[in-house]
Image (cartoon, rainbow, N blue to C red):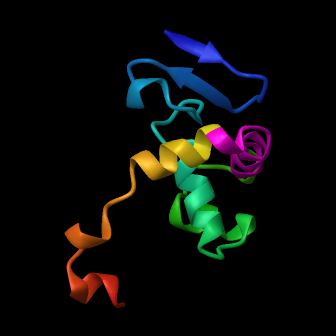
Amino acid sequence: MIQATEHLYIVRDERILNGEPIIKGTRTPVRAIVETWRMGIAPEEIPKGLPHLSLAQIFDALSYYSDHQDEINAHIERNRIPDDLIDPLVRDV
């Protein structure tokens, strides 16, 4: 069942990522947008790597993050790969 949020493009669907906030009509979690933005990618550049998303969806995801930082940070941490599991050749790039 899809659950709307107070943000136009952000929904929750218990069948997708256990109800983690996603971009409506996709399986793209808000955390993916936030992590990309935190790497220094400007919001206007994010659709180049995720062409199925519009700029409005990107900005709404960042707005959702601004309103729900603790929740999204918890999702990011829960999905983080521990450093000891990352091959040093990849980690040191």
Q: Nearer the viewer, residue 60 or 18?
A: 18
Residue at (61, 25) in percent of width and height:
11
Residue 61 visible, this orientation: yes
Which residue is located at x 74 percent, y 66 percent?
A: 44
Mostly what secondary structure, the magenta segment?
helix
| Residue 52 visible in the displayed image | no
Give 12 or 83, whichever is nearer the viewer: 83
The picture places residue 17, in percent across and down from the top left corner, at: 40, 31
Please tell me which residue is depicted at 50% across the width and 50% down the height of the picture. Answer: 76
Instruction: Point out the image quarter for the C terminus.
Output: bottom left
Q: Is residue 40 left or right of residue 88?
A: right
Is residue 20 left or right of 71 when viewed as pictured?
A: left
Q: Quadrant of residue 92?
A: bottom left
Residue stretch rendered in magenta on the structure:
57-70
How many labels were placed on the picture?
0
Q: Could you say which is closer to the camera, residue 38 or residue 80?
A: 80
Position of 52 relative to 6 (above/below): below
Residue found at x 70% / y 33%: 9
Q: Is residue 60 magenta?
A: yes
Residue 78 spot, x, y in % from top left: 41, 46
Vertical comparison of 49 with 9: above or below? below
Question: Residue 29: x percent and y percent?
Answer: 52, 42
- Name the quadrant containing residue 65: top right
Closer-to-camera residue (81/39): 81
